[in-house]
């Protein structure tokens, strides 16, 4: 009898169409597990990984993978536990075969200080251990996970499609909101009210607005900015207190003035989910004294900071890259408790992985795209 097989959509080489490959289902690592994939989210960073580059501004580029050949994308993964390693079965009864789980993919080397301390996303070797980058990811019917602690149980009230996209787009924005929260709380004591500007009202923006309303004090006004009116309407429905249309046809100083007007003088924190240089510079120009700007998006580009103004205004600029395993555990709980709604989702089969990735690249996906695996 032949061994049971799994299927995956592999990137043969940068910018080449994904191809379906069949292979044996892997054995679980001793301390880990293998899941049967339910859904795999298609993230914008998958485009960068597929191209193996992102723009740094001034014509410069950055590559991600040392070996960008025959790899499997997908770092937003939910599935059912298929098998457990010998050691994994013995030491932790929490997760069993048949459980619904979401996977933390930004695994790192698992040996260095930051990995041991639970901030795997900060590992200098993060990309080597990341599922869907240098390790096989979720564009596959089965996925091997090196340690059981990277699997988080999904409550019955949370859909497995929602669970998958929590693992990157959701948890990254949760991390972003957590980063600006202390500054907003501090300024709230001084000013009585504060304002958070969320730039981008796409898939990440909708998570961000809901999470901000769920975990920030009620006196924080959440304002959503985007270049598209229809997206702003959805952001408003998701809970944004105000919205601002950043119409690309309008000149820069007018947009900054409008933003200050709508926000009542400026904002105290910004989460920039686009981060293309233009948005980031504009955000700094709208930021109040003592404010914080968290930059999340990987659109690409660079900014010019007027350093004396930055110092005098006591601004803080903070990068946010995905999140920790603990952030994922917290967010899964929050989504279940507060019944946070996922952004609109479009579904594709594994065989359509290439088509879906190209649609995302060409801006033809509204919300998030997911691969739904066959039962
Ligand atoms: Zn992602
Ligand atoms: Zn490490």
Image (cartoon, helix red, strand yellow):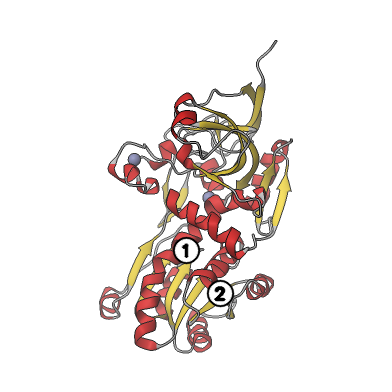
Q: Where does the image place residue 240, in percent across and percent down from the top left?
A: 59, 76
| Residue 295 or residue 160, whichever sits in front | 160
Q: Which residue in the protein does label 1 denote? A: 275
Q: Is residue 39 left or right of residue 74?
A: right
Q: N-terminal of the two: label 2 or label 1?
A: 2
Foreground label between 2 and 1: 2
Q: Is residue 119 left or right of residue 364?
A: left
Residue that extends furthest to the top in the rendered view of this protein: 1
Task: State which image quarter holds ligand 2.
Answer: top left
Asked which quadrant contains residue 266, the reply is: bottom left
Estimate how packed mark 1 is, as few (under 14), some (14 to 19) or many (20 or more) residues with alpha carbons within 10 Å: many
For the N terminus, the quadrant is top right
Q: CA distance from mark 2 to mark 1?
A: 13 Å
Q: Which residue in the protein does label 2 denote? A: 225
Q: Tell me what residue is drawn at x 52 percent, y 81 percent.
A: 255
Judge whether 342 appears above or below 7 on screen: below
Asked which quadrant contains residue 14, the reply is: top right
Q: Are marks 2 and 1 in contact (CB under 8 Å)?
A: no
Q: Where does the image place residue 180, in percent across and percent down from the top left?
A: 40, 69
Q: Where does the image place residue 264, in percent across and percent down from the top left?
A: 48, 89
Q: Of helix, strand and loop, which one carries label 1? A: loop
């Amino acid at each position: 009898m032949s061994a049971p097989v799994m299927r995956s959509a592999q990137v043969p080489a940068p910018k080449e169409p994904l191809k379906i490959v069949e292979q044996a289902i892997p054995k679980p690592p001793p301390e880990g597990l293998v899941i049967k994939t339910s859904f795999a989210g298609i993230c914008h960073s998958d485009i960068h990984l597929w191209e193996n580059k992102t723009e740094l501004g001034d014509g410069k580029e950055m590559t991600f993978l040392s070996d960008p050949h025959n790899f499997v994308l997908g770092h937003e993964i939910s599935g059912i536990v298929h098998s457990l390693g010998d050691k994994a079965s013995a030491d932790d009864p929490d997760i069993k075969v048949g459980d619904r789980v979401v996977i933390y993919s930004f695994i790192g080397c698992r040996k260095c200080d930051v990995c041991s301390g639970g901030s795997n996303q900060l590992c200098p070797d993060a990309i080597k251990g990341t599922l869907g980058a240098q390790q096989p990811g979720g564009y596959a019917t089965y996925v091997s996970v090196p340690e059981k602690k990277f699997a988080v149980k999904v409550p019955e009230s949370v859909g497995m499609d929602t669970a998958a996209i929590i693992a990157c787009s959701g948890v990254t924005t949760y991390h972003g909101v957590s980063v600006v929260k202390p500054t907003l709380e501090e300024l709230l004591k001084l000013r009585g009210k504060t304002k958070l500007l969320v730039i981008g009202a796409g898939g990440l923006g909708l998570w961000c607005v809901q999470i901000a309303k769920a975990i920030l004090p009620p006196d924080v006004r959440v304002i959503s900015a985007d270049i598209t009116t229809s997206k702003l309407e959805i952001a408003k429905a998701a809970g944004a207190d105000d919205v601002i249309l950043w119409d690309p046809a309008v000149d820069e100083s007018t947009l900054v003035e409008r933003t200050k007007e709508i926000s009542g003088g400026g904002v105290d924190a910004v989460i920039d989910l686009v981060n293309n240089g233009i948005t980031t510079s504009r955000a700094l120009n709208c930021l109040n004294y003592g404010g914080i700007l968290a930059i999340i998006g990987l659109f690409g580009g660079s900014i010019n900071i007027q350093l004396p103004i930055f110092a005098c205004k006591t601004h803080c600029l903070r990068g946010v890259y995905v999140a920790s395993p603990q952030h994922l555990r917290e967010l899964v709980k929050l989504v279940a408790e507060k019944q946070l709604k996922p952004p609109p989702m479009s579904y594709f089969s594994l065989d359509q992985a290439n088509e879906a990735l190209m649609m995302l690249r060409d801006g033809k996906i509204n919300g998030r795209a997911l691969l739904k695996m066959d039962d």
